[in-house]
């Protein structure tokens, strides 16, 4: 039995927007995810910055911060649904719209954390973050998307478990390793002053990673949320 | 139609299968003559669970608009009209603007009923809808359900209370030790015999 029914053509995008708007409204009121991501991120930046903080250590510090805050926050993605997921499954909606909306919502939340923490990284580690912010956008967006896609998929997988806040980092970080290495490599090169074309291999790897896991999410989501 | 059975007899499981939320381990389910997974079937079902399926941090109005959008939002305000129609009909204006987490059990149940009706379903499935309600709230809900039935909507609900079944249903089926008996008119139900059967099932 299909968990989510296929809707008429053109309905998926509308459903995606409806769920995304609902998720952002709930998040705006509860601030559950952004708090569980933002506060640890800020503390981590300060602790890492208290040591040997320079341009060389900035990329690693940035991606350790983003990965840990994503792993902490994304565990709440489906917890916020509570009974709502059953009601979503009852509606004749496309499962793809649900998974895409959840991924977009997580990506946006992580983007907020990235945007807020960038000035702190700039102040504590290297002023290159200010001057190279345009070029940095690419690895930050693609790496952030990788975290959101994998975090949403694994978050759905463990939503019924009691220890999901502990389980998500354990599952997510090993899966994310290739993408994190590529993101750190690209960020390092850009902060070293290299042009964007010099990191095209890392960016392509991040893009391929995003597409692979997005496709996996779309294929598996129905099976994962089945009761 | 009422589904009667002792606690733990499988009433909720049966209703979740009928609502297409659970797949049967064997056998198949046919709803309106079609298999449960056939596109279109869910659009004709409304389901009120034992626990609320609403978003606690949204208002009742926001929940109704959201869910009616899922059932046919066309981006031109059609879903908004559907949500507003059912909201005005079932839920009082005072309740519409309140967040779900601030509602009493009875108010939640009414809001959940409105959610299940936003798409004008032909079949309304309710899992123990009166559990936890005080007398006033139960009477109010019963009145709302009667109004739905009088419009030709079919109601299928689970209960362990014969009087609830007799108040609302025409027919009843009894679920006992995993077996579903043939439907009987509710007036033919023997309360004393059923109570003994339920006690036996509970051990």
Image: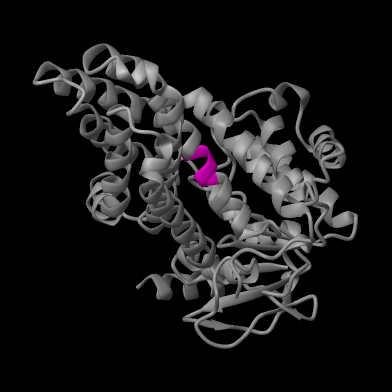
Task: Give the residue displayed 29% in from the left and 35% down from the top.
Answer: A189
Q: Determine if residue B174 is in view.
A: yes
Q: Picture quarter containing residue B36? A: bottom right
What residue span does the magenta drawing correspond to? A102-106
Q: Position of residue B101 (x, y in %)?
A: 53, 30
Position of B170 relative to A136 (above/below): below
Q: Position of residue B148 (x, y in %)?
A: 83, 52
Q: Position of residue A164 (x, y in %)?
A: 30, 49
Q: Determine if residue B131 is in view.
A: no
Task: Give the residue displayed 48% in from the left and 45% down from the top.
Answer: A82
Q: Nearer the viewer, residue B143 or B25?
A: B25
Position of A203 relative to A43 (above/below): below
Q: Nearer the viewer, residue B195 or B146?
A: B146
From the image, give the main secondary structure of the stretch colored magenta.
Answer: helix
Q: Nearer the viewer, residue B117 or A31?
A: A31
> How has the structure been colored for display?
one colour
Position of B151 compared to A71: left or right? right
The answer to whether residue A103 is magenta is yes
Position of B169 compared to B178: left or right? right
Q: Picture quarter containing residue A20? A: top right
Position of A143 relative to B16 (above/below): above
Q: Residue furthest bottom?
A: B27
Q: Position of residue B194 (x, y in %)?
A: 55, 73
Task: Give the residue displayed 73% in from the left and 68% down from the top.
Answer: B1
Q: Nearer the viewer, residue A50 or A226?
A: A50
Q: How many marks?
A: 0
Point out the image quarter for the N terminus of chain A. bottom right
The answer to whether residue A65 is magenta is no
């Amino acid at each position: 039995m299909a968990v989510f029914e296929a809707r008429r053509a053109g309905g998926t995008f509308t459903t995606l927007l409806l769920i995304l708007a609902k998720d952002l409204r709930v998040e705006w009121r509860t601030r559950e995810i952004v708090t569980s991501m933002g506060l640890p991120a800020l503390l981590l930046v300060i602790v890492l910055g208290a040591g040997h903080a320079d341009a060389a250590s900035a990329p690693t510090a940035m991606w350790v911060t983003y990965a840990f805050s994503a792993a902490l926050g994304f565990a709440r993605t489906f917890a916020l649904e509570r009974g709502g997921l059953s009601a979503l499954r009852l509606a004749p909606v496309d499962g793809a719209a649900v998974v895409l909306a959840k991924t977009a919502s997580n990506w946006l939340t992580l983007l907020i954390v990235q945007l807020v923490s960038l000035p702190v990284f700039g102040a504590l580690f290297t002023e290159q973050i200010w001057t190279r912010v345009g070029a940095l956008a690419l690895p930050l967006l693609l790496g952030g998307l990788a975290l959101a896609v994998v975090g949403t998929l694994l978050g759905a997988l463990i939503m019924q478990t009691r220890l999901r806040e502990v389980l998500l980092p354990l599952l997510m970080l090993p899966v994310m390793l290739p993408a994190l290495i590529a993101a750190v490599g690209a960020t390092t090169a850009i902060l070293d002053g290299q042009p964007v074309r010099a990191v095209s291999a890392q960016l392509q790897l991040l893009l391929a990673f995003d597409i692979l896991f997005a496709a996996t999410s779309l294929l598996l989501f129905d099976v994962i949320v089945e009761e | 139609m009422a589904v009667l059975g002792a606690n733990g007899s499988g009433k909720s499981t049966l209703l979740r299968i009928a609502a297409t939320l659970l797949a049967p381990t064997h056998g198949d389910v046919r709803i309106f003559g079609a298999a449960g997974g056939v596109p279109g079937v869910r659009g004709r079902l409304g389901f009120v669970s034992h626990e609320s399926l609403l978003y606690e941090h949204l208002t009742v109005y926001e929940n109704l608009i959201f869910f009616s959008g899922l059932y046919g939002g066309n981006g031109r305000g059609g879903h908004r009209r559907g949500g507003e129609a059912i909201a005005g009909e079932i839920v009082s204006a005072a309740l519409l603007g309140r967040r779900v987490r601030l509602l009493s059990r009875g108010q939640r149940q009414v809001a959940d009923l409105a959610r299940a009706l936003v798409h004008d379903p032909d079949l309304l499935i309710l899992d123990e809808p009166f559990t936890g309600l005080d007398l006033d709230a139960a009477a109010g809900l019963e009145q709302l359900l009667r109004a739905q039935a009088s419009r030709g909507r079919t109601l299928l609900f689970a209960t362990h209370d014969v009087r609830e079944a007799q108040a609302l249903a025409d027919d009843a089926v009894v679920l006992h030790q995993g077996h579903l008996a043939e439907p009987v008119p509710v007036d033919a139900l023997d309360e004393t015999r059923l109570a003994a059967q339920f006690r036996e099932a509970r051990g």
